[in-house]
Structure formats: C-alpha cells, structure tokens
Image (cartoon, rainbow, N blue to C red):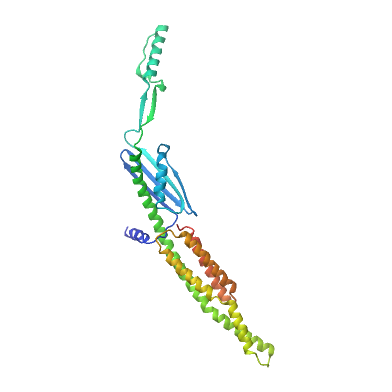
Amino acid sequence: MQTNLTASQEARQTAVRSMTGYGRAQKLIGNKEITVEIRSVNHRFLEYSSRVPRAYAYLEERLKNLVKTSVSRGKVDVSLSVQTVSGTDSQVIINHDLARSYLDALKNLSEDLQIKNDVTVSQLARFSDIFTVVRVADDEEEVWQAVSEVAQEAVEHFVQMREIEGLKMQQDLLYRLDLIEQMVAKVEELSPKTVENYTNKLHAKLEEVLQNKAVDEQRILTEAAIFAEKIAVAEETVRLGSHVHQFREILKSNEPVGRKLDFLVQEFNREADTIGSKAQDLEVARVVVDLKSEIEKIREQIQNIE
C-alpha cells in the first residue's frame, strides 16, 4: 500500500501521462446507483465517445466537458449507468373515461344478451389501454450534481493511472537519453581517430607506390584535412546533445508534452542520419546503428504520451 501511494505522489510531480488509462467509480446517491467508467487508448488527437442511457441524454454534453478538463489527447470512451434501487421513477396513469366506456359497454352487453354482469376490477384491468406508464420527470440539475460527483471520482482514478504509467515511461525515456549521450560521446571520441587512421593508411599507401621516393607530407596533410572536413560530425553531435537537453526540459513541464516530443524525436533522427551518412569507420557505423535503435525505441514510447 505504501509503495502504491509513493508511486502516485511521484507521478503527480511530472506532466508525462500515458494516453492509456482506466477509471471507475460507483456510488449510491439518493435512490440511484450511479456508475461511471472511463477508458482510453492512444490517438493523435482527442476523440471522445460515450454511452449514456437515453433517459439521461441531457447529461452527455456536460459529462463530455467535465472529462475534457482533465484530458487533452487520446481516444476516450465514457460509460454512464444509472439504476433506481428503491422507490420508482415511473407512475401509472389511469384513463378513467376509457375505463367507464368499457364498463358501460359490458353492462349494455349483459342487458342485451340477458346474461349476468359479473365484471370485476381485475377483469376490467385486462384492457391494458386503460393504463399508461409514464416516467416521473427528474430534477435535471439534481441528477447532474449526483452524476458529476461520481464522474469526477472516476476521472481522478483515470488520470492517476495515466500518471503512474507516465512516470514509468518517463524513467525509461531518461534512461535511453543517457544511452544516447554515451553513444554521441563515443562518436566524438572515434572521429579524430578515424582521420588519424586515414592519414596513416594514406601515408603507407603512398610509400608503397612511390617506393624509395620522397613522400609529399604537405599533400598528405591536405588530403587528410579534406577527409576530416568530409566526415566531420561536430555540428551534428552538438545539435543532438542540445536536443537531448531540450528533451529533458520538456519532460519537466506542466503541460501535455507528447506532440513536442514527437517533433523533437524527428530532429534526433535527422542528426543521426547525417552522422551515419558521414561514417567512414566501421566502429562509428556500429554506434550509429545502436543510436538509431534507441531513438526508435523513444519514438515508439512517445506515441502513447499525452
């Protein structure tokens, strides 16, 4: 119990929420048992649907507005059930004029055919059109107060589940950001060695071709400089590091962050693609493959962030 409470408190300190959630509340208020259930899955925008008893259709718009105050993205489905558990919400109206007409008709029939008139109330009640069952009108505002109380509790449970799952997602995202930073540092470490290896290979090749002739050191330095310029990834690694920092800052904000993170991950991929296209070293290429794999895992995670 203590662990769950701690997780809930931690979750409320972050704006990261999963778009997947479930919340349910049930209460007996007056003579009505009210149940509200809320479910959601991920969606690019907010898509709301509800199942409300026809007799309470007037509550649908107000229920929608209540839920929307706590949800900004996701495919949300709300179900409302209202059951009368004591007393009745209907009454029977008797058509006395029609009943008298039936009674008079039966009396005339008895006289005309000279048979006994033994009509009773029970027999007369068999004419069902004498009775009309009508629903007693509710006090709409009173019903809404009761339903909104239960709905608000369901929303709180729903949001709490989203926040707890969001906390787990945030922890995973932060872990993967650390991995990306380590990979970027590895690329920055390997890049100068790639130029050095290229220079050494070029020097060895020229010595092999020229044999005992003097090697033009200046030409080697020029070629090495051109190669270094061609494979330079300093700008990309700096930008990628900046994106990682910005990603962390967005995770701390107090508003829905899913769309911002989705855009930022596109920038992650752009920088990683550029680094990969410049990779002339097998080890750097392997790091880039791992880098893109982690970025893809982040992209998949944020598809379910509100």
Of residues 296 and 55, the one drawn nearer to the viewer in this rendering? 55
Task: Tell me: residue 161, above or below residue 103.
Answer: below
Which residue ends up furthest to the left in the rendered image?
A: 30
Say whether residue 92 is left or right of residue 261.
left
Q: Quadrant of the N terminus?
A: bottom left
Residue 141 percent location from the top left of the image? 34, 40
Say whether residue 242 is left or right of residue 100.
right
Of residues 61 and 282, the one drawn nearer to the viewer in this rendering? 61
Q: Quadrant of the C terminus?
A: bottom left
Number of marks present in the image shown:
0
Residue drawn at x 31%, y 38% as measured from the top left: 31
Task: Tell me: residue 27, above or below residue 205.
Answer: above
Residue 129 percent location from the top left of the image? 42, 22
Of residues 119 and 277, the one drawn nearer to the viewer in this rendering? 277
Residue 232 placement: quadrant: bottom right
Residue 34 percent location from the top left of the image? 36, 42
Residue 81 percent location from the top left of the image? 39, 41
